[in-house]
Image (cartoon, coloured by chain):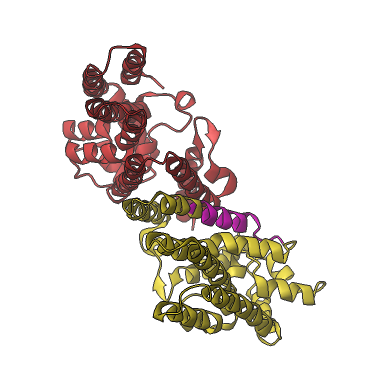
Chain colours: A yellow, B red
Amino acid sequence: MSCCITATLVHDDIIDKSAVRRGRPTVNDVWGEDKAVLFGDYLFAKAAQFCASTGNLRVIKLFSQTLAAISSGELNQAFDAFNLEQTHEHYLDRISNKTASLFVLATESGAILSQAPERSVKALRDYGYNLGIAFQIVDDILDFTGTEEELGKPLGSDLDQGTLTLPAMLLLERYPEDNPIKRFFQNWGELENKKQVIELIRDSPIVQECYDIAADYCAKACQNLNLLPDNGVSQVLMDLAGYIGTRRN
Amino acid sequence: MSCCITATLVHDDIIDKSAVRRGRPTVNDVWGEDKAVLFGDYLFAKAAQFCASTGNLRVIKLFSQTLAAISSGELNQAFDAFNLEQTHEHYLDRISNKTASLFVLATESGAILSQAPERSVKALRDYGYNLGIAFQIVDDILDFTGTEEELGKPLGSDLDQGTLTLPAMLLLERYPEDNPIKRFFQNWGELENKKQVIELIRDSPIVQECYDIAADYCAKACQNLNLLPDNGVSQVLMDLAGYIGTRRN
């Protein structure tokens, strides 16, 4: 019995901390899981209504494809949880679906609705993709390098959910035999292993390596913008790419 | 501690039985809650894609309105859980959103997509509404009068979730002072009270009263069909209304 109690306490310790986002309690935490799920459905529905109100079939189709991409990306992540046999391609495919597709929806829809020429629609689509990938890579770095105050959620929360992100993959490749990620996944809840993972990643060149990869995607995003008319708006998008590639929270 | 253990066991007893629908384990039960939620999102997205593929803006708008209606109906139900101060209007409003709106989406969209005249679109919309209300009332009766084998889920599962349906409301009105529903809600998990609610409803005229109300809606649904051309298809819809008003599982 005491074993069960201990396990529950450790588990609760992790879960309770995860009940905040950007330092504020989640809907899940305040209203409970059932209502949070229904409220999520309601927000989906309201988004669909706004989208339908544009009256633009191409945008509506893109919106519904994006919903499918996001949810399949999140599903893949859930099914891949605690699976150590994942490649960089898996990771890229997953973040392309769960994050970059949403950026593409925003940038491509804007182009379509403003009746931009097809080459601009494609340029903004590619910009959204590259920006989205860079955003997620930096997000995954910050989960190890940030502070709980900056992030508004516990450090290493991806590991808590069994999710292997790029920094964790690089650490696994560096130490394929004795690796604290393996130990953390095998003895889920032993926080000492998680602490070790975080320290190893912070003290290695992995962080810079990941920022470099993100910077490459930001550079590609900026190249995409070169196809657009050179005006104040594309400069704002360029600045956004610069911010996303270097953000620290 | 033993008090907690007992509470957990009673709770688990209820929850475990609810992990089946139509006699088969739910996705929630097989894959866990997180994946079930994501899979629900994925199905929403696929439905949105099919809908968008019709290319009909009116149907797409109706679809998104319906998603909002269903989720707000379910949310209202969740927020009204264990609230004994609900009127018949509350109930009707809730089942109109959470159930009848889905029937309306099916019948009205069919009419729109087959380019039926406006009076037929309206007739099929009204038919869907009345059929949906009747369907839900009968569903709520069966939650008390069916068998677990027929229903494929435990009897009185609405009460387990704190949901007051029409039969329960009528029982509360008949016994406003000492009522086992009040006792069950106040001492949630005491199955003896739930058993008493089920027996009292089964042995009273409440069941017939509810079937009569459902039959009125079915009759209205059939009247709506009178506005359509008299052909084989409207006869099928008429038969469907007859089945829904009298179904026993």
Residue A75 within the segment the image draws in magenta: yes
Q: Is residue A187 visible?
A: no
Q: Nearer the viewer, residue A218 or A165?
A: A218
Which residue is at 30% across, 48% downward? Answer: B72
Which residue is at 55% across, 72% downward? Answer: A224
Q: Compared with residue A126, is residue B78 higher up or lower down, i.e. above or below?
A: above
Placement of the C terminus of chain B among the 4 image quadrants: top left
Residue A226 in the image: state x and y as whole percent. 53, 76
Residue B68 in the image: state x and y as whole percent. 32, 48
Q: Is residue B85 left or right of residue B16?
A: left
For residue B223, which quarter of the picture?
top left
Q: Compared with residue A174, is residue B57 higher up or lower down, i.e. above or below?
A: above
Q: Is residue A145 left or right of residue B106?
A: right
Q: Nearer the viewer, residue B231 or A230?
A: A230
Residue A106 in the image: state x and y as whole percent. 44, 64
Residue B215 within the segment the image draws in magenta: no
Q: How many marks?
A: 0
Q: Nearer the viewer, residue A179 or B190?
A: A179
Q: Is residue A189 visible?
A: yes
Q: Which residues are magenta?
A: A67-83
For residue A139, which quarter of the picture?
bottom right
Residue A127 in the image: state x and y as whole percent. 53, 70
Looking at this rendering, what residue extends furthest in the right direction?
A: A177
Main SS, magenta residues: helix
